Image (tube, rainbow, N blue to C red):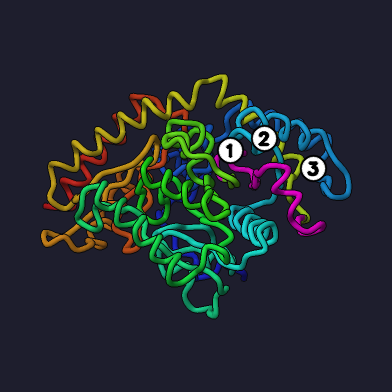
């Protein structure tokens, strides 16, 4: 009898039977508020009728047309539609299946287009689990341990994680930029540095937003030295942060943007966007893949864009995100185990610490499990897995946020008794 690998660790005991909107239901009919959204994937909620209809119609026409062999209408339509929402100047797209594949495509493009070998990443960033993507990942050793040697040519600079350092944001930002300059002077010459890879909000690293001064500093250095700025919007894109792109909060101009997760409401689809001029500097034949730009996934993605735009989900994410952040902070202030509550839009993290400021992994894990027992599905993140994160779909309403906060308040009261 076959079974799933024992290395797959389940965050909750729920066996989902079906989903609708913000809710999942198990086989017994118990309802759960799903504030995981498939790790930020089901942006329009579970089984949004327009996404379901688009996928069903496409299945009856063409399931797969390999897009370096034949073109198909959903791919062409999605490409056209993304042109309306991509950052200015990023007018060329490559599609793949997963976030890791998009990251590796950007890595390949960056090195080929610049002729430089090295990449700078920022501490706490998550970029994937495949070998090259894991080599860029510093959010936790669990993603890269045990299969060394990793890819060479990767250098790490600090991220302005003010709470971790015990500083205010300005001090943390000045430190991070100063250390980046030191890295470029001591470890990777600017002339050998192809790109900076960064998330606008650290995802697996603990839901820590960047800031305008820091990203502007990266942009200045990139421009000065001919380094590409790659923004990993895999978790932060498509309205998640209350702007269409996470970097919109900070006014920074990317050279490459990476997309996945909320792009297709649960269908496997990812992509990389750059200018046509930059794309054309890479080597012919260096991009491809069997399943990239799958017809059904592209149809679902186009429908997802319709829903996001026509239902005002970016604005909803901003409003409900503010409600969720303020509510989580209010709840956290009542208990000493929550040291910091932070986030941007519908990405809200509560960091658990001991009285002496050390990571409190045990209480965070207990809170996440207790929330599931009470009908609220959450996840943990952070280097020590001591941050409980809330990632509801963009369709979440005010009453559902209040319900989640009420449960969360009960959870915290129970785990600190």
Do the CB atoms of the residues marked 1 and 2 lie less than 8 Å apart? Answer: yes
> Residue at horizontal 47%, vertical 60%?
121
Left/right placement of residue 265 relative to residue 339 reads: right
Give the crowd class for mark 3: few <14, some 14-19, many >=20 residues within 10 Å.
some
Q: Which mark is residue 63?
A: 3
Q: Which residue is mark 2?
A: 300
Q: x, y percentage for residue 257?
A: 58, 45
- Element at badge 2? helix
**What number of labels is visible?**
3
Mark with earlier residue (1, 2): 1
Q: Is residue 297 above or below residue 4?
A: above
Do the CB atoms of the residues marked 3 and 2 lie less than 8 Å apart? Answer: no
Q: Is residue 285 magenta?
A: yes
Left/right placement of residue 377 relative to residue 103 reads: left
Q: Which mark is residue 101?
A: none
Give the crowd class for mark 1: few <14, some 14-19, many >=20 residues within 10 Å.
many
> Residue at horizontal 43%, vertical 25%?
316
Residue numbers of the magenta segment: 261-287
Q: Is residue 92 magenta?
A: no
Q: Which residue is mark 1?
A: 265
């Amino acid at each position: 009898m076959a079974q799933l690998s024992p290395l797959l660790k389940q965050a909750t005991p729920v066996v989902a039977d079906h989903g609708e909107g913000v809710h999942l239901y198990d086989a017994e009919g118990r309802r759960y508020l799903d504030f995981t959204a498939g790790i930020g994937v089901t942006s329009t909620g579970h089984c949004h009728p327009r996404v379901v209809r688009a996928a069903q119609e496409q299945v009856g026409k063409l399931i797969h047309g390999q897009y370096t062999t034949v073109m198909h209408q959903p791919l062409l339509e999605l490409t056209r539609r993304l042109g309306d929402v991509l950052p200015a100047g990023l007018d060329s797209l490559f599609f793949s299946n997963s976030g890791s594949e998009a990251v590796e495509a950007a890595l390949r493009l960056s090195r080929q287009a610049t002729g430089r070998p090295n990449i700078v990443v920022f501490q706490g960033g998550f970029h994937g689990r495949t070998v090259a993507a894991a080599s860029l990942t510093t959010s936790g050793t669990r993603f890269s341990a045990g299969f060394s040697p990793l890819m060479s040519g990767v250098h790490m600079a600090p991220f302005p994680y003010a709470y971790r350092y015990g500083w205010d944001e300005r001090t943390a930002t000045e430190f991070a930029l100063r250390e980046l300059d030191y890295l470029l002077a001591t470890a990777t010459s600017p002339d050998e540095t192809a790109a900076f890879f960064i998330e606008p909000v650290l995802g697996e690293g603990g839901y820590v937003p960047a800031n305008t001064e820091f990203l502007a500093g990266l942009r200045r250095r990139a421009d000065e030295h001919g380094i590409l700025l790659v923004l990993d919007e895999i978790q932060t894109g498509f309205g998640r942060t209350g702007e269409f792109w996470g970097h919109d909060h900070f006014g920074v101009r990317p050279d490459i943007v990476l997309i996945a997760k909320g792009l297709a409401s649960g269908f496997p689809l990812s992509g990389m966007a750059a200018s046509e001029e930059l794309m054309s500097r890479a080597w012919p034949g260096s991009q491809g893949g069997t399943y990239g730009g799958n017809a059904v996934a592209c149809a679902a993605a186009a429908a997802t864009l319709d829903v996001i735009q026509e239902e005002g989900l970016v604005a909803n994410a901003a409003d409900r995100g503010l409600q969720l952040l303020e509510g989580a902070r209010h709840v956290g202030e009542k208990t000493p185990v929550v040291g910091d509550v932070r986030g941007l839009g519908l990405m809200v993290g509560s960091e658990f610490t001991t009285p002496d400021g050390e990571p409190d992994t045990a209480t965070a894990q207990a809170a996440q499990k207790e929330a599931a027992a009470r009908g609220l599905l959450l996840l943990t993140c952070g280097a020590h897995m001591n941050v409980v994160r809330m990632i509801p779909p963009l369709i979440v309403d005010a009453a559902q946020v209040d319900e989640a906060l009420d449960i969360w308040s009960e959870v915290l009261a129970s785990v600190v008794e």
